[in-house]
Amino acid sequence: MSLDGCGESCLQGCYGMISVESWPQSAVRLWTLAQRFQKFVAVGVVGLAVNQGSLAAFHDGFDVAVAIASPIAIFLSMIVTFFLNEAWTWHDRGSGRIMSRAMYYVPINVGGLLINWGVLYWLHESFGMHYLLANLFGAGLAAIWNFGLNNAITWRA
């Protein structure tokens, strides 16, 4: 198992080198998953900025209805996060052509798009929540879906 070029006997994280030679494999897998999730969250912050910025630009700048602006903004962030996740979060996984992984990523994230859009629309329309705040809730739920499925399917070990 290669862990960011560190080898099997150690993991490198925020706290420097941590020896895992005596750790059970299940603990190493959990540690690796936690490190990957941290990267996914960092990429997600960039994606969220693209999403929120695009949503605000379409809705406030171009007067596009939230129900239409939201999926467009989410799709734009999906493109950005795919390439960032490919290059950083799951750089050590996946073989073959990038289009093969994109063919898994897009349908999974369309599920996330529907979750994000549905929550945003429901909170905004039913409760009058500001659309950008409602979008944060939707994006948070979609992120859980996206990470779980992309980790297991798109960039499987």
Image (cartoon, rainbow, N blue to C red):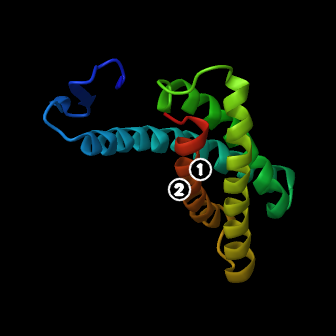
Q: Is residue 53 above or below residue 103?
A: below
- Seen as rendered, the residue at the extreme bottom is 127
- Residue that mark 2 sits on: 144
* 121 left or right of 145 in image: right
Check disc 2 and give the amino acid type: Ile
Task: State the CA–CA distance, disc 1 to disc 2.
Answer: 6 Å
Q: Position of residue 131 (x, y in %)?
A: 69, 65
Three-letter code, disc 1: Asn
Residue drawn where x is 81% and y is 54% of the image: 69
Q: Give left or right: position of 83 versus 67.
A: left
Image coordinates for residue 94, horizontal then vertical, percent: 56, 26
In the picture, the quarter occupied by the N terminus is top left
Badge 2 element: helix
Q: Are marks 1 and 2 in contact (CB under 8 Å)?
A: yes
**Label drawn at residue 54:** none
Of residues 129 and 120, which is closer to you in this image?
120
Residue in front for this viewpoint, 34 or 59 = 34
User: Residue at 63% across / 67% down in the picture?
Assistant: 134
* Residue 60 shows in this picture: no
Question: Of 138 and 59, which appears nearest the observer?
Answer: 138
Residue at horizontal 70%, vertical 35%?
Answer: 79
